[in-house]
Amino acid sequence: MTTRWLRPTRPGQQPRLEFGADYNPEQWPREVWDDDIRLMRAAGVTVVSLAIFSWARLEPREGEYDFGWLDEVMDLLHAGGISVDLATATASPPPWLTTKHPEILPVDQQGRTIWPGGRQQWRPTSPVFREHALRLVRAMAGRYGNHPALTAWHVSNELGCHNVYDFSDDAAAAFRGWLRERYTDLDALNAAWGTSFWSQHYSEWAQILPPRLAATHPNPTQQLDFKRFSSDALREYLRAERDVLHELTPDVPVTTNFMIMGAQKPMDYAAWAADVDFVSNDHYRLPGPQSLDDLSFSASLTAGVAGGDPWFLMEHSASAVNWQPVNVPKKPGELLRDSLTHVAHGADAVCFFQWRQSRAGAEKYHSAMVPHAGADSDVFRGVVELGATLQRLSALSGVRRTAARTAIVFDWDSWWASEQDSHPTERLRYKQEALDWYSAFLALGVRVDVVPAHAELAGYDLVVAPILHVVPGELRERLEGYVTGGGHLVTTYFSGIVDEHDHVWLGGYPGALRELLGIRIEEFEPLLDGETAALSNGTTGTVWTDHVEVTGDGVEVLARYKEGGAAITRRTAGRGSAAYVSTRLGPDGLAPVLAELLERAGIGSELPQELRGRVELAIRGEFWFLINRTAEPVELTGLDGEVLHGRADLIEPRGVTVLRRTV
Ligand code: GAL
């Protein structure tokens, strides 16, 4: 991907950090729009995403467009100096379309129709939906392609948020097409899916179905391929809209908002990034002890997916959301700190869902920049402060994040495959393991990039690949090359187990990585709920253990299980090393293990000792972000530089200090 950033909407526009929100003026009477523009200007808003859910208002009857209101909003925004990231408006089909063509409605695994009433009720593979949606995209591009406020196109919205897994007949037909491309002939598919098992051999393509509700565990490779297909189907849809936009408005960059956050796993954004002109992400913080860590992890992964280029934070929340069991507002400082954490990891735009809090509809209790209480509110005052802060930090615009010396590899294929059914345990959580390692890095004050498996690893001194379950031959060679070339690789339980077809590498685990790690495991030994395994280094494992046999040269046992077996090993190989952690240690247990591995690799923290753990460091060129992870002030010593934000002597509770350092 070669990143193209927003199209400037005024002559001589200076580089800046963008600031704004989803704007849904159609929910409000006309007189509110003037107030919106006035308040946007007061807050320093530079960009809004418009018309995301406007299809039913823009095309109230098939082929009849009503653009008048949107023309007016576009003009008002432009007159107010605000650019528009204009949605293609295809996110949710209008009632006339689902009534006339119920065959566009998705079908779940149990054969139940997903009816209208919510949103995103369309099949990613429906030719009928696509025809109608692309006609609207053409109409939008034709109408607004030359509008001076237009700065980017926003394809649909959070593709796959509710409709990624569709088991309809359309999906079945498209799945077969996808499989034909992947395998060419049925013999190859039968081999890849291991269909000799349970009498599943296919003799015609037409016999193949999505993994619909089955009597017991559906074929695992069929399931894995269906996950790959479902991600690809939406990606293909993204490309279809993008191609229309590129054809009609070649100068306007196209994006769509990803959902790199929490437990969102169905979309392989590492692959999708190639199909947008710049990466955008939405992030909502989940409660819990690793809430902040997850924010930083997701931001870092977004930067990794964007290849290190700046990216656009399309949505986060000004305060509470409405879709958790209990929705708690943000505490003082959090709005600014969360926003600047995204900026620290490369966001050049900070936007929210949404501008004005709705009076009606399912999201009326979701916070917004202008809350129900109005502009005379702490939330809006916080918004104004954030707008001013982003203006002061405009020198950051376009500055890439500075790569760390360490990385965590994040691999969607391994996420999907390692958590499938009929495995040694159902308790394994891929994302959690990766996040735990990230938390351990944060605790040690060592910067770490989160990168997709296809990323170039050679620049990193140490790479952690947690639960790297799927290791095709090509990846195995790359990892071997990385270690031989002097890299320090760390991996964990259930890694290296299968190839790209989910077939087990034979001869003992961890299969593809066995020789590199110099160990051999004959049987997995997962732990029952409540069971733990004490290690000689004082840490405690849960979820998983292995009976590790040391087989290679140069393998050192760094920790043993109390019963005596090796729990953590490290093999020196060439100028590098390959380490294995055979149990789940959690963030606290991983911290000392990681500290030792980092020390062996000669990697230290860039932070003064007193700040480590309490402060997160992220660097973009000359700009150092010091993010207070605690609710107490943290004294700031040992780092100098020009203070661009915050205080020089301390970092406020839940606050951030931004330094410009020329060292
Ligand atoms: C996102 C979505 C927005 C809004 C928001 C609420 O998933 O794109 O439209 O629903 O969540 O948190």
Image (cartoon, rainbow, N blue to C red):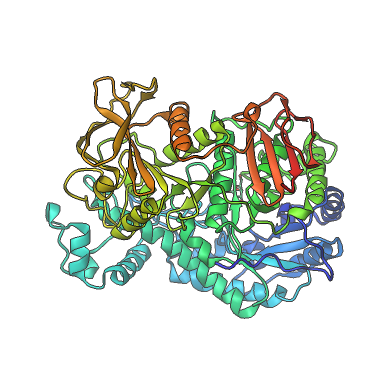
| Residue at 68% over, 25% down | 631
**Horizontal side, residue 593 vs residue 340: left or right:** left
Q: Picture coordinates of residue 297 (x, y %)? A: 54, 42
Given residues 631 and 572, the one toward you in this image is 572
**Horizontal side, residue 344 vs residue 356: left or right:** left
- Quarter assignment of residue 174: bottom left
Can residue 54 be seen here? The reply is yes
Q: Is residue 290 placed above or below 470 in the rendered structure? A: above
Q: Quadrant of the N terminus?
A: bottom right
| Residue at 73% over, 25% down | 633
Given residues 311 and 660, the one toward you in this image is 660
Can residue 102 be seen here? The reply is no
Given residues 544 and 171, the one toward you in this image is 544
Q: Is residue 476 placed above or below 244 in the rendered structure? A: above
Given residues 133 and 270, the one toward you in this image is 270
Q: Picture coordinates of residue 479 (x, y %)? A: 36, 53
Q: Is residue 624 placed above or below 238 in the rendered structure? A: above
**Horizontal side, residue 259 vs residue 423: left or right:** right
Q: Picture coordinates of residue 417 (x, y %)? A: 33, 49
- Quarter assignment of residue 544: top left
Q: Is residue 33 placed above or below 656 in the rendered structure? A: below
Q: Picture coordinates of residue 49 (x, y %)? A: 69, 58
Q: How many marks?
A: 0
